[in-house]
Image: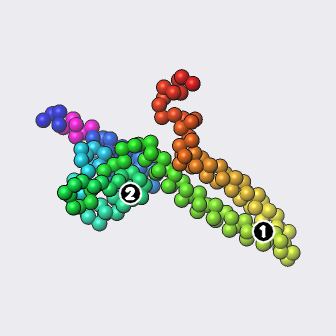
């Protein structure tokens, strides 16, 4: 019995850590615990099995699974003879990392670029208006320069995200640490 307790305690420790880490990236701890449950499961699980194990409502469980599906951290699995939807973790942690961060980063980048471009267009209207006061014109020029610099940053960030999606980043930071030592 002691060995089983050690096994459960070690799993719980990792699941709690994963839940807290996922919280740092905007994913709720309950979704992190669900991911941990699926990670340690020796078979794909149904919503009912996950609900029973974690004590969450079916609605909450369904929403959590959908979030993990959207982040490509879990996948729907087909098993012959099973009529209910089954879910399992994506086994490739590197791909999960790439998917998770590129999805999150792309959303933020797009939102910020859209806001910046709209603001730049408005500032250009202010700057081209002959009736704009000198004080407002100077502030608009300063803001315009700041926003142009911000766009440069987001263009760089887009290239960084591209390198994750194409896996070009692995040319610089290989998965196999031994390759770093050889080169």
Report x, y in % for residue 84. Answer: 23, 61
Relative height, residue 46 to residue 140 (above, below): above
Residues packed near mark 2 inside 10 Å, few (<14), some (14 to 19) or many (20 plus): some
Quadrant location of the C terminus? top right
Q: Quadrant of residue 140?
A: bottom right
Task: Name which residue lies at 73% across and 71% down.
Answer: 122
Q: Is residue 147 visible?
A: yes
Q: Position of residue 7 (x, y in %)?
A: 22, 37
Which residue sits at x=49%, y=50%?
Answer: 101
Q: Which residue is pictured at 53% across the width and 43% down the height?
A: 167
Q: Residue at x 51, y 27 (%)?
A: 179
Disc 2 + disc 1, Cβ < 8 Å: no
Q: Determine if residue 52 is in view.
A: no
Magenta-highlighted residues: 5-10
Vertical relation: 104 (above or below) 41:
below
**Is residue 60 found left or right of 153 in the rendered image?**
left
Q: Residue furthest bottom?
A: 131
**Quarter holding residue 132:** bottom right
Instruction: Judge left or right: residue 26 versus residue 140.
Output: left
Q: Secondary structure at mark 1?
A: helix
Q: Circle 1 sits on which residue? A: 124
Q: Is residue 176 left or right of residue 56?
A: right
**Residue marked by disc 2:** 69
Mark 2–mark 1 Cα distance, whole angstroms, equals 42 Å
Quadrant, the N terminus: top left
- Residue 6 in magenta? yes
Q: Earlier in the sequence, mark 2 or mark 1?
A: 2
Q: Main secondary structure of the magenta part?
A: helix
Q: How is the image coloured?
A: rainbow
- In the rendered structure, the answer to whether residue 25 lies left or right of residue 171 reads left
Which callout, 2 or 1, points to the residue nearer the camera?
2
Q: Is residue 166 above or below residue 115?
A: above
């Amino acid at each position: 019995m002691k060995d089983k307790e050690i096994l459960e305690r070690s799993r719980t420790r990792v699941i709690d850590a994963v839940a807290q880490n996922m919280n740092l990236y905007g994913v709720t701890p309950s979704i992190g615990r669900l991911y941990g449950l699926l990670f340690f499961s020796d078979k794909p699980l149904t919503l009912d099995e996950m609900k029973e194990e974690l004590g969450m409502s079916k609605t909450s469980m369904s929403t959590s699974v959908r979030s993990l599906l959207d982040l490509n951290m879990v996948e729907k699995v087909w098993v012959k003879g099973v009529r209910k939807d089954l879910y399992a973790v994506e086994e490739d942690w590197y791909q999960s990392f790439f998917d998770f961060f590129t999805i999150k980063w792309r959303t933020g980048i797009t939102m910020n670029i859209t806001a910046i471009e709209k603001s730049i267009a408005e500032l250009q209207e202010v700057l081209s208006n002959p009736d704009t006061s000198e004080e407002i014109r100077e502030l608009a020029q300063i803001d315009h320069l700041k926003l142009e610099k911000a766009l440069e940053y987001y263009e760089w960030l887009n290239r960084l995200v591209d390198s994750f999606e194409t896996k070009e980043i692995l040319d610089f930071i290989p998965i196999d640490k031994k390759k770093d030592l050889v080169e």
